[in-house]
Amino acid sequence: MIRSAKKREYSTLSQLWLRVSIHAHHFIPTKYWTDNVHDMEILYLPQADNWIYTKKNKIYGFISICDGYIAALFVDIPYQRHGIGKALLDFVKDKYTVNLTLNVYKENLQAIYFYRKNGFIIKEETTDIQTRHQEYIMMQYCNNNRR
């Protein structure tokens, strides 16, 4: 089931974010992620619309949206490749009638493949100023806004 996250669940979401970020971004020092987990919980999650994938009160993944920008899409490591990320992405594609954008590290090949498979295209290559790693800006046009 996908539902809106409750504020009391932000700690769980930030810990899930930390685990998956360290796992998926092996090219960035772990300290970067541990230094930012607190900000994720108290600054970033409260600014977004957060949707969680849950079964029997267990959170398997979440997606965070800010004005059409996918700020986060994370599925806990043991449950990746079980359709949870796609379900969350399809949910926001249906819910939000805007073009969706996101940033993904160029070195995160698994995520790039996932987003391309789900209709996103690479629009631009940039450098993340915090990590100094190359990233892609990707976009998926809303069915109502396709160019």
Image (spheres, rainbow, N blue to C red):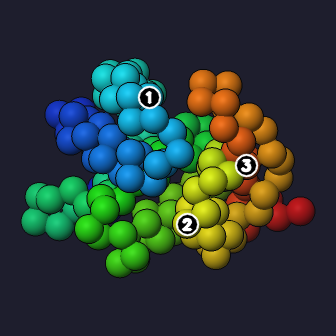
Q: Amino acid at mark 2?
A: Gln
Residue holding disc 2: 110
**On the image, which quarter does residue 66 sit in?**
top right
Residue denoted by label 3: 136
Query: Residue drawn at (51%, 68%), measured in percent from left and top?
Result: 90
123 horizontally vs 81: left or right = right
**Residue 70 visible, this angle:** yes
Q: Nearer the viewer, residue 59 or 90?
A: 59
Q: Position of residue 119 (x, y in %)?
A: 69, 71
Residue 37 appears left or right of 123:
left
Earlier sequence position, callout 2 versus callout 3? 2
Foreground: disc 1 or disc 3: 1
Residue situated furthest right in the rendering: 147
The amino acid beneath tag 1 is: Tyr
Q: Whole-Å distance between the Cαs marked 2 and 3? A: 13 Å
Write the residue at 21% across / 34% down: 11
Left or right of residue 56: residue 122:
right
